[in-house]
Every structure is written in C-alpha cells, then in structure tokens.
Image (cartoon, rainbow, N blue to C red):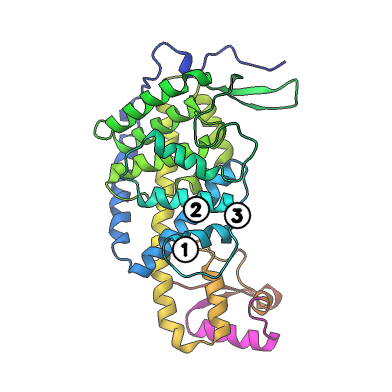
C-alpha cells in the first residue's frame, strides 16, 4: 500500500495557483542577480566571434548533459557537443549522433539563442518531442499526458512506495497550462527575475503536464525567465548548478509542492541562480584567458605540447582533475618518458604550466593568469 501523506498538494488548495512569498526576504539576492548579470553581459561583449561560439558550445553542452543527468539520463558528451557545433555552423569531425543527444542539443541551443521568443504550448511540445526522440515507451510524445492513472513521483519497493508528489489529473492539464502561459507571459514586467523564474519552475513542475521530461522543460522555462529579466540571451548555467545539488533540489521541490507559500523555495532557488551566474562568469573569464595564453605560446610549442594543452583546456575552469602527470602526457601525445619530461619543462618555462610536487607526485597545472 502506498504511503501518501494526508497533507494536500498545492494544486488542491483553494487559492491555487496563486503563490505568495515575502519579497523582502530576498531583495538582496534580486539585486545581486542584476549586478552579476551586468558583469556577465559586459564580459560577454569582450569576446571575439570565435570565443563567443566556443562559450555557447560549452555552456549549451554542459546544460544539455546536466539537465539530462538530473533525470538519470546519461548522454554521450562528445556527441552532444558535436551536434551543437554543427548547429552553430562550426566544422567538427564526423561523428554519429544518437537521437537523444541530437534532441537535447537542439533544445538547449534553441533555448540559449531564442530566449525572447514567447512561451507557448507549441514551443513546449516541440521541446518535448526533441528530448523524447527515440523513446517508444510513452503514450504521447510532443503533447500533454492523457493517461487516466495518477501522475505520481514515487520511490521505494513495490507495494510499499512513498509518494513524493502527485500532479493534477490529466483531464485538467490543458486548463492548467492555459492559465500557466497567461501568467508567465503577463508577469515579465510585474515580478522581479528571481521570483518569477522560481515560481515559474515550481508552478510548471506542480502541473507536470508531460509523461516524462518535465524537469528538463521546467528548468528551461526558468532559464527563459532569467534571460528576460536581464534583457539578454540565456547564459545562466542553471542546470549545471542544480545537478551539483541534485538531492537537495528534489527535497526542496517536494517540500514546496505542499504549499502555496513559496518564500523558502525562492530563497533556496535564488542562491542556486546566483551560483549558476558565477559559473558562467568563470567560463567567460576562462575562455578569454585561455585564448590569450595559447596566442602567447603557440609559436614556441610543438604539436605534442599543443595537443596536451588543448586536452587540458577542454576540462574548463575547474581544470584537469588531479593535475597532469608525465604519464598522462605520454598517453595523450604518444611520446617517450624522456621527451615528455623535456616538453613539460619547456611548458613550465614558457609560463603555460606550473609544477607542483616531486618525483612520482609531480603534477602540472594550467597557468592562465
């Protein structure tokens, strides 16, 4: 027998879907969002076209991978990135891309480049069709759910499941989504960005209009609200940040789904958005710094050294996990131990790498600043 709490869900309460919150509790977070947003937009303007495309490719790939990982779906990163590069008109090595990777890549790039497009049923259903490509276990792809059984999020063994959330019946979905679109498209000038984005996510997830993919689409809606709040394209790495707090994210959503008082949810959500903004700023600074470093050393390094540096740079601002060892260098370049040591020493002398440790504990790290 399923363990269902006697507490009603938010959509069962008389005032649904009118969420309330204490705006003063996160006024400083709203101000920080606008300030960091200005920093992000200013930094973005310093990018050259090739750097801009690289940043778009990296952020779109990261968001595609992490928004899928949150839902337990593991994709091939290189296939996602290859699809995004092709859509940006950038040449890439021939690679077979599966339907799931192709679908999420198209959705994420379309989201980043089209944040000013109005939110409609047609747009959400198009997203659903993209991210459900290749699925044969769903009754409806590219449309709202129609099944009569309750839409529930459950865990635990069969016969003793715990229901974490139950959404409105399928028969109510069209009406609920019509009200949702009306609220979202009318609220842009009525609510500050963080509050609007957080409520939009909670509201949408509470309706849960699709058989699957609601989390990915709900996070995309939040990204649109944030971009509209700044008046710029969406570059906030929200899914990437949420994925790093996955367990906390689900716990906060479950707690918020039982009430229309959304203050605590919005405070948590605001912290996540601010951290996501900082991730994006770090990426922009990284792209600029790595371009400067490679321009500075390119005429002084050989093909092996360039290959190793590019491999390290692929890891992004977080860097090469554990640092680069001489053994790693040999594996990347296919060279001998003696040549590896000479190459690495030269990269240190050129200021491209810094060295830590001794003997077998020696590691090399990118030196970008």
Task: Tell me the residue at 39%/51% (across/down).
Answer: 112
Q: Looking at the image, is 138 positioned above or below residue 302? A: above
The verdict on residue 349 being magenta is: yes
Q: Is residue 294 left or right of residue 323?
A: left
Residue 61 spot, x, y in % from top left: 50, 56
Give whichever of 75, 30 is nearer the camera: 75
Mark linked to residue 105: 2
Magenta region, residue range: 332-354
Q: Looking at the image, is 335 positioned above or below residue 211? A: below
Task: Tell me the residue at 52%/14% (across/down).
Answer: 8
The verdict on residue 58 being magenta is: no
Q: Circle 1 — which element? A: helix
Give whichever of 34, 138 is nearer the camera: 138
Q: Earlier in the sequence, mark 3 or mark 1?
A: 1
CA distance separating discs 3 and 1:
14 Å
Residue 81 spot, x, y in % from top left: 52, 60
Q: Nearer the viewer, mark 2 or mark 3?
A: 3
Label 1 close to label 2 by CB (< 8 Å): no
Label 3 close to label 1 by CB (< 8 Å): no
Residue hosting label 3: 98
Residue hosting label 1: 86
Q: Looking at the image, is 127 positioned above or below residue 210? A: below
The quarter of the picture where the N terminus appears is top right
For label 2, the crowd category at 10 Å Cα-Cα, with few meaning under 14, some 14 to 19 and many 20 or more, is: many
Q: Circle 2 — which element? A: helix
Q: Earlier in the sequence, mark 1 or mark 2?
A: 1
Residue 247 spot, x, y in % from top left: 59, 37
Task: Tell me the residue at 56%/78% (across/down).
Answer: 307
CA distance separating discs 1 and 2:
10 Å
Judge whether residue 359 can be spotted in this image.
yes
């Amino acid at each position: 027998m399923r363990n269902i709490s006697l507490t009603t869900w938010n959509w069962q309460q008389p005032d649904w879907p009118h969420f309330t919150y204490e705006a003063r509790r996160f006024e400083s977070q709203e101000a920080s969002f606008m300030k960091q947003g200005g920093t992000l937009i200013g930094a973005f303007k310093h990018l050259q076209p090739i750097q801009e495309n690289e940043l778009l490719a990296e952020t779109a790939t990261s968001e595609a991978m992490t928004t899928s990982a949150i839902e337990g779906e593991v994709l091939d990163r290189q296939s996602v990135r290859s699809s995004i590069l092709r859509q940006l008109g950038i040449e890439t090595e021939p690679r077979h891309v599966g339907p799931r990777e192709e679908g999420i890549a198209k959705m994420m790039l379309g989201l980043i480049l089209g944040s000013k497009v109005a939110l409609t049923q047609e747009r959400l259903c198009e997203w659903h069709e993209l991210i459900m490509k290749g699925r044969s276990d769903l009754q409806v792809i590219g449309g709202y759910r129609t099944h009569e059984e309750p839409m529930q999020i459950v865990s635990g063994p069969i016969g003793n499941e715990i229901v974490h959330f139950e959404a409105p019946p399928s028969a109510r979905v069209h009406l609920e989504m019509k009200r949702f679109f009306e609220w979202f498209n009318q609220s842009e000038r009525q609510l500050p960005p963080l509050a609007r984005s957080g409520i939009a996510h909670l509201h949408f997830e509470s309706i849960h209009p699709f058989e699957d993919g609601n989390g990915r689409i709900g996070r995309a809606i939040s990204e649109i609200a944030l971009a509209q709040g700044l008046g710029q394209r969406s570059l906030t790495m929200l899914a990437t940040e949420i994925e790093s707090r996955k367990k906390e994210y689900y716990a906060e959503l479950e707690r918020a789904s039982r009430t229309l008082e959304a203050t605590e949810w919005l405070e948590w959500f605001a912290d996540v958005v601010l951290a996501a903004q900082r991730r994006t700023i770090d990426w922009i600074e990284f792209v600029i710094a790595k371009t400067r470093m490679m321009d500075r050393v390119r005429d002084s390094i050989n093909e092996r050294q360039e290959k190793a540096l590019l491999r390290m740079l692929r890891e992004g601002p977080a860097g090469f996990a554990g640092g680069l060892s001489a053994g790693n260098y040999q594996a990347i370049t296919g060279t001998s131990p003696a040549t590896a040591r000479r190459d690495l020493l030269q990269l240190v002398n050129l200021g491209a790498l810094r060295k830590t440790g001794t003997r077998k504990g020696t590691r090399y790290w990118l030196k970008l600043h």
